[in-house]
Image (cartoon, grey):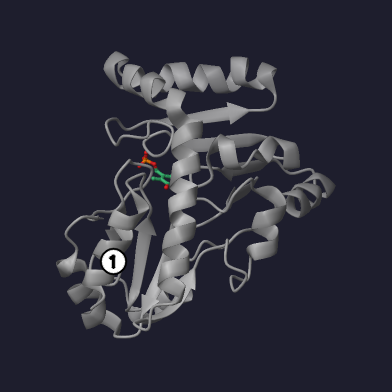
Amino acid sequence: MLYLETPANPTLQCVDLAALGALAKKYNCLVACDNTFATPYLQQPFAHGADFIIHSTTKFLNGHGTAIGGILLGKDVERMKTSIGKFFRTTGACASPFDAYLLTQGIKTLEVRMDKHCNNAEQVAAFLENHPAVAKVNYTGLSSHPDHAISAKQMRHPGALLSFELKKGLQGGIDFMNKLQFCVRAVSLGTCDTLLSHPASMTHFSVPKEEKEKYGITDGLIRMHVGIETAADIIADLHQALQ
Ligand SMILES: *Cc1c(COP(=O)(O)O)cnc(C)c1O
């Protein structure tokens, strides 16, 4: 099985779904795609040869950070009803009624939320790209991103995730995170709120430097999920925290 994630954490690297779908077909290989970052609104991997799609419903599908969950979609309905359905039933991987209720409420506003997330992310990316304290912005909506063309080909919009590198490295990242007042210091994504994390001092603190750099995690890298607040409020907080 070819297992893909596009766009991927934390550099927003994208892979060409149609090209890899064709390659997998040539070798008679199944394709599974984690579509959590994009959501079904921005990207539909079945149209590009995927056999399975995985979403963490904890993120944009629920949309409010109120319940954890996940979903597996299969193109082959018969297979989903038989072998995979049997596995699902016997392992008990189902949501509680209340979590399912929160998901079905949240998912109704997916499209309107995504439009706002995406619009805000564009404004935030443009602000960061022009800020003197920022060395680099990873956002596929910017023509400077190496996967700009792949993202434009297979996604409706580049989405609401981005990362950026502070010129002042590790200490710059720590200082920036401590100054945030409006945006939230948290991992995860897909909530109404803007979430930021500093992998080098948080999630990847204990990972050796060479290994971190192999995945594009530099000391000054900040990961950002752009929420659906008023864009000017998000930008004002970034502005003061970057001083
Ligand atoms: C969060 C996330 C997961 C895991 O989902 P949980 O609901 O947190 O278990 C898997 N893939 C991607 C891309 C994610 O962002």
Residue 19 lies left or right of residue 207; in this view the side is right
Quadrant hosting residue 94: top left
Residue 29 visible from this viewpoint:
yes
Residue 78: image x %, image y %? 68, 16
Task: Please tell me whether mark 1 sits on a helix, a strand or a loop.
Answer: helix
| Quadrant for the N terminus in the image | top right
Residue 193 lies left or right of residue 17; in this view the side is left
Q: Which residue is drawn at 61% across and 59% down?
A: 14
Q: Residue at x 57, y 35 (%)?
A: 40
Q: Which of 69 and 230 is in front in this view?
A: 230
Residue 94 visible from this viewpoint:
no
176 to 79, vertically: above or below: below
Residue 4: image x %, image y %? 60, 50
Dot 1 crowding, Cα within 10 Å, few <14, some 14–19, many 20+: many
34 to 126, vertically: above or below: above
Residue 41 lies left or right of residue 199; in this view the side is right
Quadrant hosting residue 192: top left
Say what amino acid the circle numbered 1 marks.
Leu
19 to 192, vertically: above or below: below
> In the rendered image, which residue does mark 1 sit on?
238
Residue 111: image x %, image y %? 51, 32
Q: Which residue is drawn at 51% across and 57% down?
A: 8
Quarter, ligand 1: top left
| Quadrant for the C terminus in the image | bottom left
Residue 21: image x %, image y %? 75, 47
Cβ(mark 1) to ligand 1 < 8 Å? no
57 to 193, vertically: above or below: above
Q: Which residue is drawn at 57% across and 36% down?
A: 41
Kindly give the residue lying farthest to the front in the view shown.
Answer: 232
Residue 236 lies left or right of residue 50; in this view the side is left
Q: Which of 169 and 46 is in front in this view?
A: 169
